[in-house]
Image (cartoon, rainbow, N blue to C red):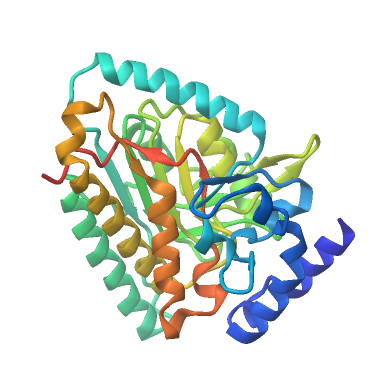
Amino acid sequence: MATVESWIRENLNHRIMSNADLAYHKLRDLEPLIAPLNELTKPGELLVLCPTWELHHLPLHAVAIDDEQILLERNPVVYTPSLTVLHHLGRLNQSATLAAAASSSSLQPAVVISVYENDGTSPNQAQESRKVKQQLKRLSRNFGATLQSGPHVTVPFWEEYTRDAGLIHFHGHALSDDKGENQSLVLQPDHNVSISDTTDTTNSSHAGHHLTARKVLSMNFTQNPLVVNIACGSSKAELKPGDELFGLTAAFLLSGANSVVGTMWPIESADGRTFTAAFYDDLVEQSIKLKDESSSRPRPVVDVARALQRAVLEIRDNEETEAPYHWAASTLSGLWKSSFFVNRFV
């Protein structure tokens, strides 16, 4: 594992990953890790990857599986923090399916939150902040929701407002150290806050401003939502004894979320917007195609893994964003199906 740790330290950074030629050259070092999948799996099959130890921090989906394509191009890929979590999600999903079959066909609510605020440091950030809010307002309208942004978006608000949501979308900032410890989503921008402030229980001034992974673990998401965190390094995690991961993604999954989309490293907000547009466009398209089949299926679902695959490859195929830094950070963890989008677009 020392070799893997060294590779991560030397190569998983903006300088390397933002240079397309250099990044692809460095990623070739990881090819032996996924080479057996060529014989063990078929193109197009869903792959559920459960890495071990430091391998959790590698973008295995961005590694070439043969001379012509990367793994994510050959197969849709979903990660799981551990087999224990995957088993937990399977049982959770089975119970949710039975409950849905017995309940009415009312649509689950969506929660869309924007905390990408302009701090006045540059005109570009002010413009990006406006673009984020414009996009999320459209997204909110499409899902019958109201964009949530401002001082009322605190930890107590999140806990109450997202409890029964079928979709939770967040665009903003995440805090963590190099290993993903003490990870949190920033609900109220405060550029003087450090990671230690979010975990200091004696300091109440920031207590409602940062949604920590530990706080998420105490929540209960009743509708097994799809959670999308467009925030820097939101899927980073801390390795615990027993080869268990703990971070925001694992916390959401253990608290009832079906699936979590996050990022493996800091990203540009513009890349997050591009991903958001392509990702939801695909999910909506899938839901429309399911319209005629809904009467013959007890609980039709869309394929989140394939939506992420298509969105990521769309970004990669753009000459301006072909470097892995722009697209390889986006990952899906947990299960790969969602019923939230079905019957919304008819």
Q: Taking the image as drawn, is residue 26 in sight? A: yes
Residue at position x 77%, y 39% in the image: 243
Image vertical order of residue 33 relative to residue 322, above or below: above
For residue 67, side relative to residue 239 (left or right): left
Q: Quadrant of the C terminus?
A: top left
Number of numbered tags placed on the structure image? 0
Q: Quadrant of the N terminus?
A: bottom right
Across and down, in percent, residue 11 comes to: 73, 74
For residue 256, side relative to residue 9 (left or right): left
Provide residue 294's location: percent of width, then percent of height. Answer: 19, 32
Question: Residue at 60% of width from left, 50% of height from top?
Answer: 183
Q: Tell me the residue at 18%/47% (across/down).
A: 288
Tell which of 94 and 116 is nearer to you.
94
* Name of the residue lying farthest toward the top: 102
Residue 18 vs residue 127: left or right?
right
Where on the picture, by quarter, is residue 84? top right
Q: Can residue 16 be seen in the rendering of this structure?
A: no
Q: Residue furthest left?
A: 346
77, above or below 266, in the image? above
Residue 266, percent across and down? 56, 67
On screen, 346 above or below 26?
A: above
- The percent coordinates of residue 247 (x first, y second) are 62, 44
- Note whether 187 is above or below 322 in the view shown: above
* Nearest the eye: 155 or 30: 30
Q: Residue at x 65, y 79 (%)?
A: 23
237 displayed left or right of 169 = right
- Towards the viewer: 40 or 324: 40
